[in-house]
Each structure stands twice: as structure tokens, then as C-alpha cells.
Image (tube, rainbow, N blue to C red):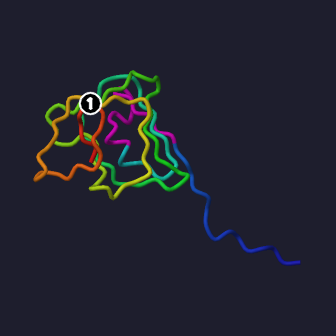
Amino acid sequence: MPLPPPPTSQPAIVATYTVDPNGPIKTIAAAARLVKPGDIVLIMPGTYHESIRMTTSGDTGKQIVFEAQTPGTVIIDGTGFATVINSSWGATTNITLKNITVQHCANPLPTQVRPLVPGPGGCWIM
């Protein structure tokens, strides 16, 4: 009896990335460049002064999750940035932020960017 044909696609590999200023992935933005649907980004406690551009979407049922390792211990500080979390004009979807505080970001002029969702603390998540 002949063997069945091999599967035509490989199952998706889900990864967990750890953001730690003392580790190999030092910024949330660096982790955002690595993620694929279903991946988790675990963020160690601290204040991260950065602007994060999302370039990859999750899928329905396979959200990309950015989560504080310990609730209430991760702050994204947007001081000086026009946007703190940029979803490429809404082109990236199915991304979840858990237990993360976003603060000190300027609300840009409508002519600079197009706000999609007003974020916590009066910040715009693009």
C-alpha cells in the first residue's frame, strides 16, 4: 500500500520573545520587527522610551500579543515622539497590548498623521 503524500504546508511555529534592556532584544520596537501571527512578546518591567511601528498583523484566532511580564510594571514613554504605537495607518490588525501603560505622547496635528484610535492618557495609537 503506498504512503500518503506529505503535508503541503508546515504548521505555524509560535514564538515567545522577551524584551529586556539587559537581554538580546532590548526594545519593544525590535521585538515588533520579529513577530508573526500567534507570537507573544513578554516585556520585562521598566520604562521604554520609544516609538513602535507595527508592520506585521496577527490573524483571527492568532493575535500578536505584547504583554507586561508583571501587570503594571511596563510603561511606554512617548515623550518627543509624534506617535508611540504606529499600526501603519491601520494596515496592521489583530494586535493586543496587555497590562501596558502608554504615557507622555503628543497628540499630533491631523495634517501630520491620521489618528485611528485615541489611546490611554490622551495618546494616539496609530
Local crowd size for mark 1, using a 10 Å CA cut-off: few (<14), some (14–19), many (≥20): few
Determine whether 1 is above or below 126 in the image: below
Instruction: Residue 21: name its quadrant.
Output: top left
| Residue at screen point 63% across, 71% down | 8
Determine whether 108 is above or below 22 in the image: below
Q: Which residue is situated farthest in the bottom direction here?
A: 2
Nearer to us in this view, 105 or 6: 105
Classify residue 74 as left or right of residue 9: left
| On-image quarter of the N terminus | bottom right
Q: Amino acid at mark 1?
A: Gly
Where residue 92 sits in the image (x, y, percent)? 36, 55
Classify residue 7 as left or right of residue 101: right
Element under disc 1: helix
| Residue at screen point 49% across, 52% down | 37
In magenta stretch: residue 77: no
Residue range (magenta): 16-31
Determine whether 80 is above or below 94 in the image: above
Residue at label 1? 121
Where residue 117 sits in the image (x, y, percent)? 30, 46
Nearer to us in this view, 73 or 11: 73
Nearer to us in this view, 77 or 29: 77
Where residue 17 sits in the image (x, y, percent)? 46, 39
| Residue at screen point 50% across, 46% down | 39
In magenta stretch: residue 21: yes
Determine whether 69 is above or below 32 in the image: above
